[in-house]
Image (spheres, rainbow, N blue to C red):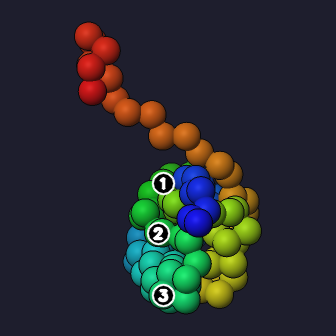
Amino acid sequence: MATATHEYVAERYEPGATEAQIEADAAKLASTTDTMRAAGEQIEFLGTTFMPSDEASFSWFRSSSPELVETVHKCAAVPLERVVLTLSLPHLNNRGRR
């Protein structure tokens, strides 16, 4: 029986971080997630958003638990402030259609 998955955002604040550093962190998160998936864990790395002016980045995951997202960061040696459950809503046009 499959475990339900949810989407999570992992927040981190890295003063002085460069785009190259954030890209390297994203590559480590993706690789670590792939390894964990191959081992049977229910987690998927969806990407990273970097906001240089706020010195913040947000990485998006689909996972069976927030603890698994934390584990990915720990194994990848990528800093983490917190993990938050998210809800993605589809964009609707003016007539309420997708």
Q: Which residue is mark 2?
A: 45
Q: Is residue 57 visible?
A: no
Place of residue 70 in the rendered image (x, y in percent of width and height, measured from the top left): 70, 72
**Marks 2 and 1: which is nearer the front?**
2
Which percent across, then down, holds residue 42?
A: 56, 71
Q: Residue at horizontal 59%, vertical 45%?
A: 86
Asked whether, in this view, residue 51 is left or right of residue 81, the answer is left
**Three-letter code, disc 1:** Met
Q: CA distance from mark 1 to mark 3?
A: 31 Å
- How busy is the neighbourhood of tag 3: few (under 14 within 10 Å), some, or many (20 plus)? few
Distance (Cα) linking label 2 and label 3:
13 Å
Observer-side mark, 2 or 3, equals: 3
Characterize the local packing of mark 1: few (<14), some (14-19) or many (20 or more) Cα atoms within 10 angstroms.
few
* Secondary structure at numbered mark 1: strand
- Please say if the residues under marks 2 and 3 sit with CB atoms less than 8 Å apart: no
- Mark 3 or mark 2, which is nearer the start of the sequence? 3
Q: Quadrant of the N terminus?
A: bottom right
Indicate which label's residue lies in the foreground, 1 or 3. Answer: 3
Residue highlighted by disc 3: 38
Q: State whether residue 24 is above or below residue 15.
A: below
Compared to residue 47, the image places residue 92 above or below, namely above
Q: Residue furthest front?
A: 1
* The quarter of the displayed image where residue 68 is located: bottom right
Residue positioned 47% across, 69% down in the render:
45
Q: Nearer the viewer, residue 19 or 69?
A: 69
Q: Earlier in the sequence, mark 2 or mark 1?
A: 2
